Image: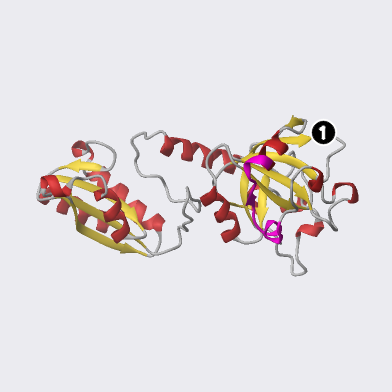
Amino acid sequence: MRVFAKRFYGFDPETHPVIAFGKAGNRDALITASSPGDLIVFVGTQGEPTAEHERGRILGIAEFARIPVDVRDVIDPARMNPSYFAADGSLLWPKGLPILRAWRFVDPRLKLIDVLREQLTFEATVRAVQLDETDTRAVLALPKSEVTVPMVPRVARLLALSDALASGRPTTGPTPTDWTGTITRTTEADAWTYAMRFGKRGMWKVGHTQDIGQRLKEVNKHVPVEEIGEGWNLALKQYWPNSVAAHAMEQRVFQSLTASRTVDERVRCTEAQMLSAWTSSLAG
């Protein structure tokens, strides 16, 4: 388990169950650096609007979901502290990660410099920084009590989708959403529906992606091409302006070939059957 730390204006997971960042890149850096079950420590900033008795102190610790969200989708802006907004009404920290569980350190909450060997760098103002083993042990040893974190409906849906993908269950292809595992993606970027063929056989793989070249590399990564002399080849592709449209065509192809599906995204059929399903799906 790794523990990260970041400066915040306060710690209130009961009403603000999200770790907020000013930029998506700073949020996504934590996704990349972390693993499921890792924690983040909330440290009060040194000035306003952090309450005077919380400034520079270790306030709480939380387990987070590595699923990017917009803060407005988790918290009603009407319930937010006015200090969270810029002069033009925009959020200062609009990007976030949902909090799954949280613990508040028992009062009197200690100053950061009384627990960690060194002060946090300036970087911890905008993004989370990882603590070393010594500081991690020191933080985890502090007395704390768990608090109730509400489950927001949108977060619950994203977690359910994440769990389904992680379990390896056969998929109809997840409906695209603006979230990532470890790589941020947006549904509004250009996308493709594709059909790959294994060698010259009647085995096909249908899906959608924003990067066909990278996707082809991924599916061939565990195929011993040098041994069997065969691998996946791109046979058909169709451009779409966004992932939602690409996913919709993928599903139409699957629906046309329901009786021919084997495992996951794979289909066993003739070339003529695939071309027929592909053409009819374009019309759809």
Frontmost residue, 239 versus 31 = 31
Frontmost residue, 30 versus 262 = 30
Report the residue that reaches farthest toward the right.
52
Q: Is residue 124 magenta?
A: yes
Residue identified by numbered label 1: 106
Location of residue 215 in the rendering, given as x and y in whole percent from the top left corner = 31, 55
Image position of 269 (left or right of 129): left
Image position of 209 (left or right of 163): left
Rendered-image quadrant of the N terminus: top right
Does residue 57 sit above or below 89 in this rendering? above
Does residue 135 sit above or below 279 in this rendering? above
Q: Is residue 234 magenta?
A: no
Location of residue 69 in the rendering, given as x and y in whole percent from the top left corner = 58, 51
Image position of 243 (left or right of 93): left
Frontmost residue, 226 versus 192 = 226
Whether residue 149 can be seen here: no
The residue shown at (74%, 38%) is 14
Rendered-image quadrant of the C terminus: bottom left
Q: Which residues are magenta?
A: 121-134
The residue shown at (49%, 56%) is 184
Amino acid type for the residue under numbered disc 1: Val
Q: Is disc 1 surrounded by few (<14), some (14 to 19) or many (20+) residues within 10 Å?
A: some
Location of residue 20 in the rendering, given as x and y in whole percent from the top left corner = 67, 52
**For the residue labelled by badge 1, is the local secondary structure a helix, a strand or a loop?**
loop
The residue shown at (69%, 56%) is 124
Frontmost residue, 175 versus 95 = 95
The image quadrant that residue 213 belongs to is: bottom left
